[in-house]
Amino acid sequence: MLIRLISGDTPRSPILAAILLIILLGLAFAPFVFPGTRSVDTAARICIFIVLVASYDLMLGYAGIVSFAHTMFFGIGAYGVALASIHMGRGFDALVVGSVSGAIAAAVLALVIGLFSLRVRAIFFAMITLAVASAFAVLVSQLSNLTGGEDGLNYQIPRALTAAQRYLEEPFFGVRVNGKLVNYYVVFFGSLIVFLILLRIVNSPFGRVLQAIRENDFRTEAIGYRVVYYRTTATILSAVAASLAGSLFAIWLRYVGPDTTLSFDIMIDILLMVVIGGMGTMYGAMIGATIFVLAQNYLQNLMGAAEEALQSVGVPLLPLFLNPDRWLLWLGILFVLSVYFFPTGVVGRLRRRG
Amino acid sequence: MHDVVLETDNLTARFGGHVAVDHVTCAFRSSELTAIVGPNGAGKTTYFNLISGQVAASEGTVKLDGREITRVTVARRTEMGIGRAFQLTNLFPNLSVLENVRLVVQARRNKGFNLFSMAASHGEITDAAEAALGRVRMQDLAGQTVSELSHGNQRKLEVALLIALDPKVYMFDEPTAGMSVDEAPVVLELIEELKSDATRTILLVEHKMDVIGQLADRIIVLHNGALAADGPPAEVIASDVVQEAYMGKALEDA
Ligand SMILES: Nc1ncnc2c1ncn2[C@@H]1O[C@H](COP(=O)(O)OP(=O)(O)OP(=O)(O)O)[C@@H](O)[C@H]1O
Ligand SMILES: [Mg+2]
């Protein structure tokens, strides 16, 4: 039963299994184990980025397609929820309509881009996605009447999902049982379901064809698969999953803006997370997203603490490098080291050992 | 006489100014094994590429069962029954031997767009793939990664993929090239078995004259891309064109 749930794709390494279990349990019980607004917010972001990175891995790691439009699809899902919540008024119906129409829009756009450009060389597809994504970002910032432009959109979500809604008078294991807690579990289970579906897709007969295309597209065509249809379908599925991740993000944040969903910085973050975790493994997304989001949120604190500690014992020079403002430098160093030592990502490395 | 399955009419491939295949008109019938011979660079592989679709015809047509397929995509031609093994090994290097064959069986059974079932749960596909591996005596290597196989085994796997596809038209491009003396007979016996099934049409590019003499019902000779001779083996081998253009070469090879 459990094996079927993960589509027979077992971690194949005891250490990896243990790490994945820790991440899963950590996220499942985050509000209780790591109470506090900031840590729960970090946990929700990890859930969402796991789906976003996993959906990107479906394209890059399995089908071997390089796309720079992934944040566009993420943004479409997020803006879908935002626009529906504004125009239909707060409510669950708006969340559903926004998510579904976002997913449909993402699918249609992916279909068009795919059919136009996946026939030709891979580099051409990559460039088209870059162009379309840039144009989309410009469009969103220009159409400020609709999208709020650079400021983005604030909107209301159902009261049942906000801290204003109390479900229990007494705290449960020290945690207030309110709408925010419910909202976290909407994000958690939503992400879990999409992740498990993606895991099933990569382990399906279709997923095997994608791997074949990545390995040798010429021969894949020669044994009877129309490669362009498979690539396009992979792009669509990936876009829909990214859009759903965006919708969950919008439900969680109650705000969307270009910086939180569409920016090219996020696109680069996704690439880093896929590579750190391990391409073509799905579980790599869990590890990559967890490491990256944690580093993004806590590296600065850690460095600040280390700087002070070193300063107080009087070590020269070193504290300078540990100044919290240098956190991006350290993230870069972490990235280079991880690619150098684990070229196949953390998952690839652990599996080879196991 | 059996029906014509595959026909090429004035089929031509030009690369820039170079004519690799030059107005080749030829028909292939079911239950017939045709050997295609010719010196290196004669256009044999390019002729195959035109038939299976990897190279677009500059001129002329290809017909399968009387239907013109000159502009049909590679994948669709495969679905229609044209199967091809490649001269230069062309596999999925980082997948297992079994997975390579499974992919072919899965294609043949149209399961590629099955998105939500587990590939591993399709036992019938695995069984058929294992059977095809058995035909080339590679069942014990099923779990190996292809890139780790010996060259000879990669060549055999190339043949196994074609067996798994089980097309109407089998095209073998020097299937035993680079195989050891104990590996080649497995493949040749297999081709002989295929031949005994009257529904199949087999095209075989081969340099070794003893192999051709043993297997072929008919030989065609390509020379500078053009059809230089066509007929029963004894007749063609005795003809001037083969004696001059080809036999000298084949003797050197041997
Ligand atoms: N894609 C291509 N572009 C340019 N020239 C090509 C191409 N493919 C083949 N040729 C040329 O066409 C000619 C025929 O090549 P082909 O590979 O068909 O010969 P062949 O009979 O299979 O030879 P061999 O016995 O060495 O396999 C050669 O001169 C080759 O260089
Ligand atoms: Mg050749």
Image (cartoon, coloured by chain):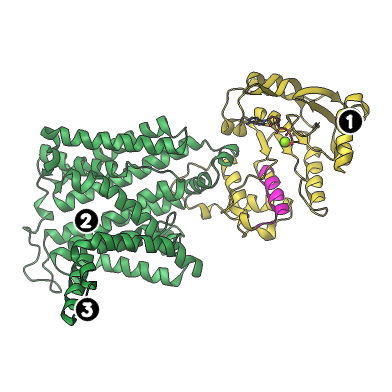
The residue that appears at 89% across and 28% down in the rendered structure is: B244
Chain under disc 2: A
Beta carbon at label 1 within 8 Å of ligand 1: no
Kindly state the secondary structure of the residue where label 3 is placed. loop
Question: What's under tag 2, amino acid-wise?
Answer: Val
The answer to whether one can see residue A353 in this image is: yes
From the image, state whether disc 2 or disc 3 is nearer to you. Answer: 3
Point out the quarter of the image occupied by ligand 1: top right
Chain ID, yellow in image: B
Type of secondary structure dominating the magenta stretch: helix
Give the amino acid at mark 1: Pro
Instruction: Classify residue B140 as left or right of residue B31.
Output: left
In the depicted structure, whether residue B51 falls above or below residue A268: above
Let me know if residue B134 appears in the view: no
Image location of residue A262, percent across then percent down: 24, 43
Of mark 2 and mark 3, the one earlier in the sequence is 2
Residue depicted at 42% across the width and 53% down the height:
A200
In magenta, the rendered stretch is B149-162
Q: Residues within 10 Å of mark 3 (few under 14, many from 20)?
A: few
Q: Residue furthest front?
A: A316
- Image quadrant for the C terminus of chain B? top right
Q: Amino acid at mark 3?
A: Val
Q: What is the CA distance from the residue labelled 2 to the residue labelled 3?
A: 47 Å
User: Which element is circle 2 on?
Assistant: helix
Colour chain A appears in: green
Residue A186's mark?
2
Chain letter of disc 3?
Answer: A
Q: Which residue is mark 3?
A: A315
Q: Which residue is under mark 1? A: B233
